[in-house]
Image: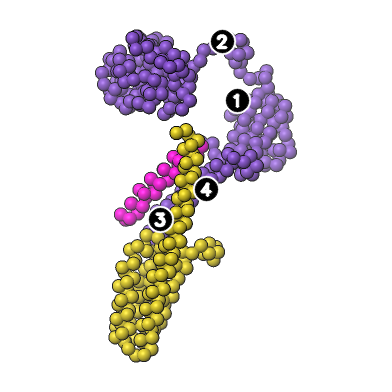
Amino acid sequence: MLIVFARVIILYAAVLFILRLSGKQQVSTLQPFELVTIVLLADVAAIPMATTGTPLINGLVGLFALLLSSFTLSFLTMKSARLRSAINGRPTVVVANGRLVEDAMRELRYSINDLLEQLRLAGYPAVNDVEFAVLETNGQLSVIPKSQRRPVMPADLGVPTSYEGLPTPLIVDGKVDRENLRLIRLDMDWLHRQIRAHGVDDPEAVLYAALDTQGRFFCQPKGRKTAGRLNGSASNRNGRPDRTAASASNGAAGLAGDSPLDKGTGQVNARLEPAEEGGQL
Amino acid sequence: MTRSTVSGLTMAILWILTVLLVAGAHGIIRAQESLARTLVMQLRRAEGALAAGDWSAAASIAVDVRREWEAARPGLSLHADHQHLDLVTEALLETETLIAARNIEAVRALRLAAERLRSLPERERLLLRNLF
């Protein structure tokens, strides 16, 4: 019994490690070879887990073989377009200029009901509102509506918009994300000043704090009852309350410019842009 | 270090590990072959002793073979099928017991043990008959 327990722990760690290495695609939109990896991972891991007569190394070697296959295929498909289309398939146009492409649908064995369902999910119940619908290699349907049927964009109205970007989490559950702090070229002194302005002395007492690309700092201390409303507060870069600041969402951003932090005032001066390196989300 | 460098490095490491794995597996098979060859040879000597009617020499060889096998077994169980290892142990024990009892069935048990030992590295080999 103890052997099975130990095996489950070891193989769990191995599968988790491989999933982590395989990337985010493995758990969201899957290419065929990625799906095979996922399906086989559980099976390969389960054999030595349940059969104590099989050496554990056999399971680990199997997992390693899956990882190697997955990595090699993704590497080769990245290098060769021909191999990519052979392994992943090619996107297929199923609606063109508001009309169903019968041959393509028959070839894909893609029923009209399935197509209509996907179109409804995309927000286009009428086929004739769709300019193009493309069935992607991962099975998702991309819908390009006719220009008269798509939502109005600020660009259509000629309305200028400012850069928004993504907020950068700086404290999550009391832990300061020093890497994100470094990416936006700010320091611990600045962070301490910001949380102090929100009535918190210790970063460990902060549940979540983030800085958005407009320079607004959001801080929510731990242990406060929400009572049906948001209990976080936002301030601008100077630490003054900001009534317009919305609650921050996860994301990463960096700062363009050499020195975004004015040491004298503690203000962020540079324009905020997405970090090239990408931070921790 | 950029992400593409990390990706390329991971790929290279994976292939280096694969080469090491193949080399390691080859080494393991060679070690198993060597062990099986030595033990089978000793079992044949025991069979010869039995044919000559020297039961005590056969018993001494059988004890030595089992001792040698028991010493090698923990290492083998890391990569060999545990069930097959049990079968070899069982056959060697049976051989030892039958020889000690001076039972003529010991010859059959000796041959069975030799065959199970011989097939140990065979099962690990990358052969079509093992793959399918």
* The quadrant where residue A220 appears: top left
Of the image marks 1 and 3, the number of the one nearer the N terminus: 3
Do tag 1 and tag 3 residues touch (Cβ < 8 Å)?
no
Q: Residue A69 got which mark? A: 4
Residue A132 can be seen in this image: yes
Q: Amino acid at mark 2?
A: Pro
Q: Residue B20 got which mark? A: none
Establish whether labels 3 and 4 are both on one chain: yes
Position of residue A236 measured from the top left corner of the image (x, y, whole percent): 38, 11
Chain with yellow colouring: B
Give the spatial CA distance, label 4 vs label 1.
38 Å
Magenta stretch encompasses residue B129: no
Give the spatial CA distance, label 3 vs label 4.
18 Å
Crowd tier of the residue under label 3, counting other residues whose Cα lies within 10 Å: few below 14, some 14–19, many 20 or above: some
Residue drawn 51% across and 15% down? A163
Of the image marks 2 and 4, the number of the one nearer the N terminus: 4
